[in-house]
Amino acid sequence: MKRDFLAVSDFSYKEVKEVFKLTGDMKKGKIKPQPLKNKAAVCIFHKPSLRTRISFEVGIQQLGGRSLYITGNEFKLGKKDDPEKREWYYDGAEVLSRMIDLIVIRTFEHSGVEELAKFARVPVINALTNLYHPCQILGDLFTIFEKKKKIENVSIAYLGDGNNVCNSFLDAASLIPLDLRIGTSPETLPDKDVLERAKKSNLSKINLTYDPVEAVRNTDVVYTDVWASMGQESQYEKKANLLRKFQVNSELLRYAKKDSLVMHCLPAHRGEEITDETMDGKNSVVFDQAENRLHIQKGIIVELLKKSKG
Ligand code: CP
Ligand code: NVA
């Protein structure tokens, strides 16, 4: 049965460990699997992307495959009664399943990706929706694992907007034991259901606070993301006013562990959610994170294709 990766929790913790092992081994050049040899993958992007697009396209090539990049012009699926759609999800999914071996999609509504995955007969990977950014978070957890040599109970302070990146951290915390602190405002909370699920799983420590110092105190990782995500640009002023006190700067970093990692998924708005001195400082691993996007996409693809074979 084919497997999809729409959320971090689509993998079990055991599978996450397998992905980390594959990723590490490919990164070190110990293995060079070619599961996409003579195969093709489509990368559908409805939002801009540098890291995700390039890491998938290069990764697919390194796994022996060919990648096709398409946008909303070619791919505009919708529900049967949606007047805006070019074609129904089922029809588009069926066509792609007859020509393509893997679908990577970045779009707005998470339900659109779920709908596509429901009908597609090949694996679908979520390359970011308004709800989740699972490949990013798996890559970031791999970076933390590389740097700290462990992942369980690592303390991570996520500061800023309760967005797709924040939701994926919470989703990961319902699977992997983490000490996750979210520093945000009452108006920019993460998704209610995702937060509830993470808390109910009773696996991780989840602490949501409106106080940036409380969030970062003694943490191993200080993480931030843009205040207004793609598609929410009109809310920028409002969010910036709410989130300014959560800016990652050297003053705030004094409260984290001395060897804390400074992380950002990028693109960054330097001088807004993160200052130059912290992004370029000795604790920053932002470019290692970005590089690891390539390695983790390959790990995710290899694992998914392996598991899809049964
Ligand atoms: N971090 C990330 O997903 O970057 P892009 O939007 O450039 O892909
Ligand atoms: N939260 C950001 C992440 C970009 C990689 C966005 O959705 O725009």
Image (cartoon, rainbow, N blue to C red):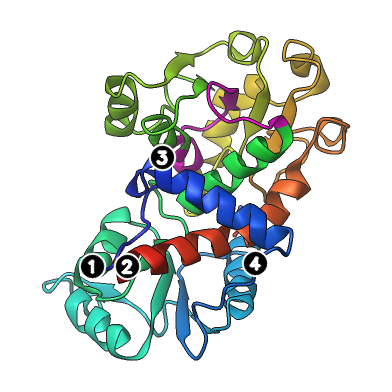
In the displayed structure image, the side of residue 36 where residue 287 appears, left or right: right
Residue extending farthest front? 30
Position of residue 78 measured from the top left corner of the image (x, y, whole percent)? 23, 71
What is the crowding at mark 1: few (fewer than 14 residues within 10 Å), some, or many (at least 20)?
Answer: few
Specify the segment rendered in magenta: 148-168
Residue placed under numbered mark 2 in the picture: 308
What kind of element bears circle 2?
A: helix
Q: CA distance from mark 2 to mark 1?
A: 5 Å
Marks 1 and 4 sit apart, C-alpha to C-alpha, by 25 Å
Q: Give the CA separation, mark 2 to mark 3.
A: 17 Å
Q: Quadrant of residue 57?
A: bottom right
For badge 1, the amino acid type reads Met
Q: Looking at this view, is 195 or 13 the one in front?
A: 13
Q: Nearer the viewer, residue 151 or 253?
A: 151
Q: Which residue is mark 4?
A: 31
Secondary structure type for disc 1: loop
Cα distance, mark 4 to mark 2?
A: 20 Å
| Identity of the residue drawn at 76% across and 18% down | 253
Residue 1, labelled with which disc?
Answer: 1
- Given the image, on which type of amino acid does mark 2 rest? Ser
Residue 6 location in percent, x, y? Answer: 36, 55
Residue under pointer 3: 13
Q: Are marks 2 and 1 in contact (CB under 8 Å)?
A: yes
At numbered mark 3, what does the secondary structure look like: helix, strand or loop?
A: helix
Neighbours of disc 3 within 10 Å: few (<14), some (14-19), many (20+): some
Q: Is residue 284 above or below residue 158?
A: below
Q: CA distance from mark 1 to mark 3?
A: 19 Å
Q: Mark 2, residues whose alpha carbon is within 10 Å: few (<14), some, or many (≥20)?
A: some
Question: In the displayed structure, would residue 65 be above or below residue 155?
Answer: below
